[in-house]
Image (cartoon, helix red, strand yellow):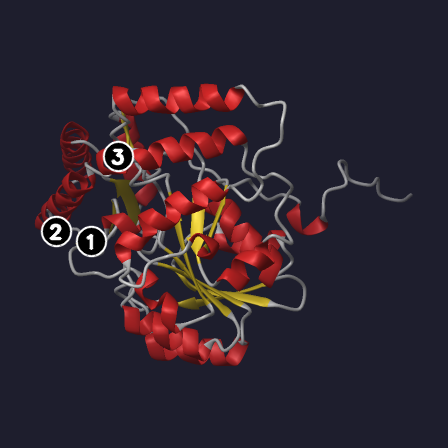
C-alpha cells in the first residue's frame, strides 16, 4: 500500500520547519526584539496621519513604482554618513530590510550559487538562502565574536560566494566591523557582492565609521539600513540600501510590481521629515546600553562589546531557566545566539531598572 501524499504539497526541504519569529507575549517589560522604546511625538504622528490621508485620495491608482521622492529623501539622509554623498540612483528600498536581503539573493544568489556569512549571526540569513535555493555556508567568528579576517578571507577564496552577508553591528552579538575588514573582503570576493547590514548602524559608538564611506572604492559593496530601529519605525516596514546604480537596476528584475505601497512611501517620507526628532533618543539609548554593559560586567557576567541597541550576555548553564525566570517577573528578553548566552534590548531607564531587578532576583533564587 502506497504512503499517502503529505498535504499540503509543501516543498520537502520546508517540511517540519518552524516559521521565524520571536515570542510575542503581553508582559510589562518587552526587551526581546530590539525595538526603539520611544515612539514618535504628537507632531510627527499628525504629519504621518496627514501624509497617509493624502495618499488615500489616490489609492485607486498604482503608486510610483520607482518611489523617486523617497529615494531622494533616503539619499539625503544617508549622505550624512559619507563625505562622498549618496545619489538617489544608488538607493533602493523595500518592505523592511528583510525584503531587501531576499531581493538581493533573488537577484544575485540562486541555484549553483553560494552565500556566506560568519556565525553567530542573524538567524534569518540562512532562511533567505534557503528560500532562493542558494547554497549556504557559515564560517565562524573568533571567541570574542569579532571577525577572524584571515579565516574569513580564506573561506571566501575557497567558496567563491556570489553574496557575502556581513552585519555590522552583528546581530545577536552587537559587534561592529572595522572598515579594513570590509575592504579586504570586497577585494577577496572578486565579482561577488559584499552586503554590510547596518540595521543598527545609527547606534554605533563614537569613532566607528559606516561602511557607506567605502562605497566609492568598491563597486561590489552594498550597505543596507532600516527605519525599524533608530527611526522608531518597526511598524512602518521600510528597509533600504545604498550601492552602485547597476546593482539597484538589477534588483528591479526581481522586485514585485509596485512593491512599495503609496501609503508606505508617504509615511516613510513623513518620518524622514522628522529625522532629527526620531533620532533624538539615540544618544540616550547608547548611554543606557553602555551603562548596562558596565553593570552586567560588574555583576560577573561575560558581555560582548556592543555597537547596537542590545547587549548579549552570559554565560549560563541553563539559559532557558534564566529566560523563564525573567519572564515570570514580567520581563521578556530573547533566548538567542550561542548556547549559554541571552540578549536583552535596551529600553527606557525604568525598563532597564526592572530588568536589573528581575535578573538580580533570578540570580538570588538560583544561587
First in residue order: circle 3 vs circle 1: 3
Question: Is 359 on the left or on the right of 30, as rendered?
Answer: left
List the residue tagged with mark 1. Answer: 303
First in residue order: circle 3 vs circle 2: 3
Q: Relative to 134, is 282 above or below? A: above
Crowd around label 2: few <14 · some 14–19 · many ≥20 (10 Å): some
Which numbered disc, 3 or 1, marks the residue closer to the eye? 3
First in residue order: circle 2 vs circle 1: 2
Q: Which residue is drawn at 64% across and 52% down?
A: 254
Q: Relative to 349, is 248 above or below? A: below
Query: Dividing the picture into quarters, in which one does residue 29 lie?
Result: top left
- The x and y percentages for residue 22 are 42, 37
Crowd around label 3: few <14 · some 14–19 · many ≥20 (10 Å): many
Query: In the picture, which quadrant includes the C terminus?
Result: top left
List the residue tagged with mark 2. Answer: 297
List the residue tagged with mark 3. Answer: 278
Question: Is 60 on the left or on the right of 211, as rendered?
Answer: right
The answer to which of 74 and 317 lies nearer the viewer is 74
Q: Residue at x 45, y 30 (%)?
A: 266
Question: Is 143 on the left or on the right of 293, as rendered?
Answer: right
Q: Relative to 208, is 300 above or below? A: above
Q: Residue at x 34, y 37 (%)?
A: 272
The answer to which of 87 and 6 lies nearer the viewer is 87
Spatial CA distance of label 3 from label 2 is 30 Å
Q: Residue furthest left?
A: 298
Q: Relative to 74, is 276 above or below? A: above
The answer to which of 17 and 80 lies nearer the viewer is 80
- The x and y percentages for residue 286 are 17, 45
Q: Visible in this render: residue 29? A: yes
Amino acid at each position: 500500500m502506497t504512503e499517502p501524499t503529505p498535504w499540503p504539497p509543501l516543498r520537502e526541504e520546508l517540511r517540519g520547519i518552524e516559521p521565524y519569529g520571536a515570542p510575542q507575549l503581553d508582559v510589562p517589560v518587552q526587551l526581546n526584539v530590539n525595538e526603539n522604546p520611544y515612539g514618535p511625538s504628537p507632531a510627527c504622528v499628525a504629519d504621518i496621519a496627514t501624509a497617509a490621508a493624502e495618499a488615500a485620495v489616490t489609492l485607486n491608482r498604482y503608486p510610483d513604482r520607482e518611489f523617486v521622492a523617497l529615494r531622494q529623501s533616503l539619499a539625503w539622509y544617508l549622505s550624512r554618513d559619507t563625505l562622498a554623498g549618496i545619489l538617489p540612483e544608488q538607493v533602493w528600498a523595500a518592505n523592511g530590510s528583510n525584503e531587501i536581503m531576499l531581493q538581493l539573493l533573488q537577484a544575485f544568489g540562486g541555484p549553483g550559487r553560494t552565500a556566506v556569512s560568519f556565525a553567530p549571526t542573524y538567524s534569518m540569513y540562512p532562511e533567505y538562502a534557503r528560500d532562493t535555493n542558494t547554497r549556504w555556508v557559515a564560517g565562524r567568528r573568533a571567541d570574542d565574536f569579532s571577525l577572524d579576517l584571515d579565516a574569513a578571507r580564506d573561506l571566501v577564496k575557497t567558496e567563491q560566494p556570489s553574496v557575502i552577508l556581513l552585519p555590522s553591528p552583528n546581530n545577536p552579538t552587537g559587534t561592529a566591523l572595522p572598515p579594513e575588514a570590509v575592504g579586504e573582503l570586497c577585494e577577496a570576493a572578486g565579482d561577488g557582492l559584499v552586503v554590510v547590514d547596518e540595521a543598527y548602524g545609527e547606534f554605533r559608538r563614537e569613532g566607528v565609521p559606516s561602511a557607506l564611506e567605502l562605497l566609492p572604492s568598491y563597486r561590489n559593496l552594498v550597505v543596507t539600513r532600516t527605519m525599524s530601529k533608530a527611526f522608531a519605525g518597526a511598524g512602518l516596514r521600510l528597509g533600504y540600501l545604498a550601492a552602485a546604480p547597476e546593482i539597484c537596476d538589477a534588483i528591479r528584475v526581481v522586485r514585485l510590481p509596485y512593491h512599495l505601497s503609496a501609503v508606505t512611501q508617504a509615511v516613510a517620507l513623513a518620518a524622514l521629515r522628522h529625522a532629527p526628532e526620531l533620532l533624538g533618543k539615540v544618544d540616550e539609548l547608547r548611554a543606557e546600553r553602555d551603562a548596562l554593559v558596565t553593570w552586567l560586567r560588574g555583576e560577573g557576567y561575560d558581555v560582548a562589546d556592543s555597537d547596537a541597541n542590545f547587549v548579549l550576555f552570559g554565560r549560563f548553564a541553563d539559559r532557558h531557566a534564566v529566560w523563564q525566570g525573567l519572564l515570570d517577573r514580567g520581563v521578556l528578553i530573547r533566548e538567542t545566539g550561542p548556547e549559554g548566552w541571552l540578549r536583552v534590548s535596551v529600553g527606557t531607564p525604568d525598563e532597564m531598572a526592572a530588568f536589573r531587578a528581575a535578573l538580580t532576583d533570578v540570580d538570588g533564587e538560583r544561587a
